Amino acid sequence: MEDIEFTKEAKKKATIYRQSEFFGIIKEECYLLEAGTIKYAQYDNAPFITYIKKGKRKPTKIIKGYNPYFLIIEGWNNIDPNDAFTTVKEENGVKISQSRFTCFDERYETEFSNVIDISIKNNEVEVLFDTRIK
């Protein structure tokens, strides 16, 4: 994908989907400032995104060299990723949960990609930036 950049005055509403540090996919609604690739450490084309989280004022920048998973879709109120946890049981007001898969399991990404790809194929959403490994 080609690099995109917006000025702070011309921010674009976007939804970012990215890998969690341990479980599943994180969805963040934001104002996208820029996204693209840069040289970072030993990576010649490391993807990066700069954005302002919804309800915040300061920009956040993320660079991901190894195994990047970024999907940026135009607008807010897009599809929510599946919850990484399931409820095992609930007793006396105590809720016990466990993760559906183990840490860093690729099935979190595959499962979400299968769902979002249908919306992309049907032109229901506009993709601004996509680094998912196909």
Image (cartoon, rainbow, N blue to C red):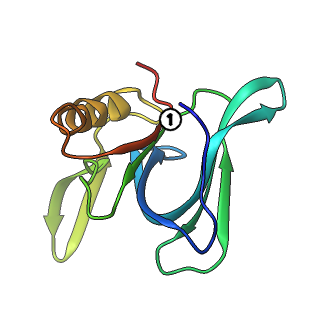
- 19 horizontally vs 76: left or right: right
Along the line of sight, which residue is nearer the eye, 16 or 35? 35
- Tell me the residue at 64%/65% (across/down): 7
- Residue 36 falls in image quadrant: top right
Relative to 100, 90 lies left or right? left
Q: Position of residue 26 (x, y in %)?
A: 42, 52
x and y, in percent, of residue 117 in the image = 25, 32
Vertical relation: 7 (above or below) 110? below
Q: Residue furthest toward the right? A: 41
Crowdedness near tag 1: few (<14), some (14–19) or many (≥20) residues, C-alpha within 10 Å: some
Residue 40, picture quadrant: top right
The picture quadrant where one finds residue 9 is bottom right
Image check: 74 left or right of 40? left
* Residue depicted at x 27% and y 55%: 97
Residue 4 image position (x, y, % from top left): 58, 46
The residue where tag 1 is placed is: 69
